[in-house]
Image (cartoon, grey):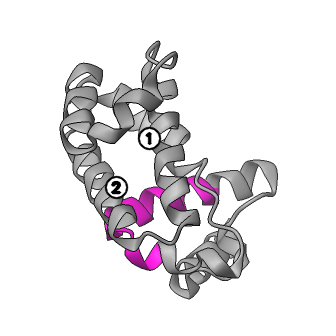
Amino acid sequence: MNRSKFIRRMLDEFPEVKPLLKGHRIGIHQEMTVFRQYTQDAIERRDRKLVCRAFQFIAACTEQADEYVRAAIGSSYCEELDLSGAQRRWVLTEMPSALRQVWFDINVFLEDRLGYSQVDRGFDREREEQLAARRRSG
């Protein structure tokens, strides 16, 4: 799935995103950032149904995406999701496992390179244990 197909599919499934894209349709990373903010707003409203729909959509796109869309999903969607704080802990339980793995891998990278990771904030004990094992091994 290339950028054009991603945008078409996103607007078919989430037509309410179209006005949010105004002024941002200049590249997949900006467009992905708009969709990430749309998801983040749903997280803040605790709109589980919409969050689940958005996560299912992104997970399906990840499986079909070309390298550019996949990179945007990782860096402009998963990396930028703010899942900090106890009020957002429910979010990871709603993520499909493949998307949660992308989120986890990015946070492992951030921890290794920058010393920052949301994984350490108590969201997913299994993932935290994986991160700790990776740190010990090397």
Task: Point out which mark residue 110 bears.
Answer: none
- Of all residues, the one furthest to the top in this rendering is 26
Amino acid at pointer 2: Ala
Which quarter of the figure has residue 128?
bottom right
Q: Left or right: 13 with respect to 33?
A: left
Q: Choose the circle earlier in sequence order: 1 or 2.
A: 1
Residue 110 visible in image = yes
Q: CA distance from mark 1 to mark 2?
A: 9 Å
Residue drawn 35% across the image and 62% down it: 50
Residue beneath label 1, please? 35
Q: Position of residue 129 (x, y in %)?
A: 59, 83
> Does the magenta stretch mainly form a helix, a strand or a loop?
helix
Span highlighted in magenta in the image:
92-108
Q: Position of residue 3 (x, y in %)?
A: 30, 23
Number of other residues with Cα within 10 Å of mark 1, as a class: few under 14, some 14 to 19, many 20 or more: many
Q: Left or right: 74 with respect to 132?
A: left
Residue nearer the viewer, 92 or 120: 92
Residue nearer the viewer, 96 or 19: 19
Residue drawn 21% across the image and 44% down it: 13
Taking 23 as reference, is 93 above or below it? below
Amino acid at pointer 1: Phe
Residue beneath label 2, please? 54
Q: Secondary structure at mark 2?
A: helix
Taking 102 as reference, is 138 above or below it? below
Q: Are marks 1 and 2 in contact (CB under 8 Å)?
A: yes
Number of other residues with Cα within 10 Å of mark 2, as a class: few under 14, some 14 to 19, many 20 or more: many
Q: Position of residue 56 (x, y in %)?
A: 27, 59
Q: Where is the C terminus found, in terms of image quarters?
A: bottom right
- Of all residues, the one furthest to the right in this rendering is 115
Taking 51 as reference, is 73 above or below it? above
Residue 133 visible in image = no
